[in-house]
Image (cartoon, grey):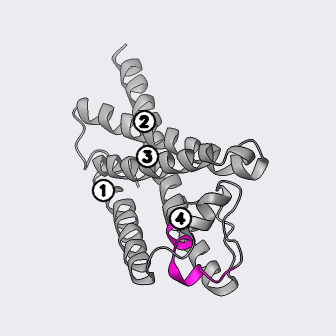
Amino acid sequence: MPQRKDNERSSEVKRLQADIKGGQGTFFLAVIVSLIYVVRLLIAKNFNFFFSLFVPELLLKSAAFTKDYPSTFGAQYSSDFSAFAQGMIPNVVVWAALALLFGVSIMLSIFARRKHMLVIGELVIYGVDTLLVWVFHLLSEPEVFSLNALIDPIFHLFVLILLIRSTVATVKLKKRGFTEAELDFY
């Protein structure tokens, strides 16, 4: 009987650890894909950002250097917002904000592997990003149900759910008395 209890506890711990890895991994993937899109923007002037963070896309589309680009706003933006925001933010502010966002996100991704409670920081960053993508999605009234307009909001919800599961799993393991050393499963 005690061995069965140990096996049940072991399988539950492995499931919770898998939840933690899943949330952290998808957050890191979204950050890396966002960085790739920034490079692609600089090389090819392509603003198609899918499966990535929304704030960098928003910052870049509002940067002064994009003022002369053709309409860079996609399906989730109304034409009123496009006319208002394009070229609005000074380049220095955009690059400083991007450096801060990517720096914090990458550092959280790295350190959360050892200090698992940092997944809460990842959840906060991605939660704000998800809120913004949904607000802008709902403001784009004529194109709300087009396929391109639905990709980002659905992806954001998926990653947000994984991050919530990751946070819940971390808290559960912490409440059960596991130390960071015992949770070091990478």
**What is the three-letter code of the residue carrying label 2?**
Leu
Instruction: State the extent of the magenta-drawn residues as a range.
Output: 57-69
- The earlier-in-sequence mark between 4 and 3 is 4
Within 10 Å of disc 3 (Cα), the crowding (few <14, some 14-19, many 20+) is some
Q: Is residue 74 magenta?
A: no
Residue 64, placed above or below residue 12: below
Residue at 56%, 41% in the rendered image: 157
Q: Which mark is residue 127?
A: 3
Q: Quadrant location of residue 179?
A: top left
- The earlier-in-sequence mark between 3 and 1 is 1
The residue pinned by badge 4 equals: 58
| Measured Cα–Cα span from mark 4 to mark 3 | 16 Å
| Residue furthest out toward the bottom | 43
Q: Which mark is residue 16?
A: 2
**What is the three-letter code of the residue carrying label 3?**
Gly
- The earlier-in-sequence mark between 2 and 1 is 2
Q: Let me know if residue 35 appears in the view.
A: yes
The local secondary structure at tag 2 comes to: helix
